[in-house]
Image (spheres, rainbow, N blue to C red):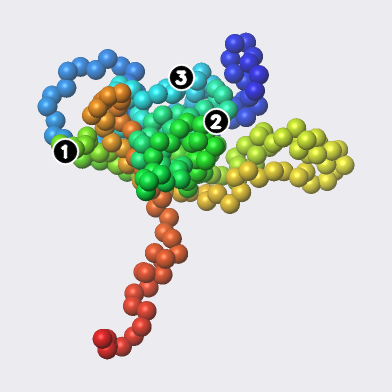
Amino acid sequence: AAPRGGQLWSPLLCCDMPIITVGIAMLAALLPQPPQPHRRDSRTMRSCTILMPMSINEIELLPMEPTPELGPVETMFVICAGLKYNNWPNVDAGIERLYNHLTPMGRVAIAPTPPKSGLQGGVTLEYFMANAGSAAVGALLMCSRFEFTGDVTISPGSQARGRIATQMVTVYNDQEDAELVSLVSAAPEQHAAILEAVRKGEKPPLPSLIAGAPKASRFFFHLEEERRPPHQGCWLLKEMFSMQKTKLQILNEGGEEFEGADTG
């Protein structure tokens, strides 16, 4: 995409952009905060939500690095919105932002490295950018919209770790939006083939980069509050657990495989 008038321009963003459902807590980061009374470490925060479209300037302002000023809800919003608009302000900016907001364990879960001496770790940004992949990342990349479902729960920390936050996130991928993203992201030679088919009155060979993505997917996000530098006081993502049942889980719900009394 080429800059126009000092702003990033893209034909995708000039269309009617889908609406993102975000936590009302996003607004808290924009306002001065009065002194807070003592609270219990374990609490459930009501997920009040608002409808909020994102402009190009707002996408460019999404922080690339974690900061203590962002709570768990704001951190999740930054990650999800960044993946939704993955290629703004530059290619794969959303994936890079995800890497920066992950714990070391979270990076290994999404981009496993070959074990060394029986251990895994040390995921570099370059390795992550080339090998990152999970159900949640696939669903969020260029998704139609996402929303925080239910309440975010914050559990108390311990001597070994900081507080833990959990939140269900629902991701939607509408077929029409998937086709639009595929069309905009297609290679120049594919654009030429599409134009040629339209001129001949034939069905255009539309690419499908997001083929097979479920229309609605749910994930549990687990975040941890860091206690040590360099990200002391920041919330980092540990895991994005898919709520979709595996075939083995579905089979296990069937109960006992054999009927009759045990003979062992």
Amino acid type, label 2: Asp
As drawn, which residue projects farthest toward the right? 200
| Residue drawn where x is 48% and y is 36% of the image | 128
Which of the pair 33/243 is nearer the observer?
243
The label on residue 77 is: none
Amino acid type, label 1: Ser
Compared to residue 2, the image places residue 53 above or below, namely below
Q: Name the residue under label 1.
A: 158
Q: Name the residue under label 3.
A: 61
Q: Residues within 10 Å of mark 3 (few under 14, many from 20)?
A: few
Q: Residues within 10 Å of mark 1 (few under 14, many from 20)?
A: few
Give how far apart the Cα atoms at labels 3 and 1 are: 34 Å
| Residue drawn where x is 43% and y is 55% of the image | 244
| Residue drawn where x is 39% and y is 39% of the image | 121
Q: Name the residue under label 2.
A: 92
Q: Where does the C terminus fall, quadrant-wise?
A: bottom left
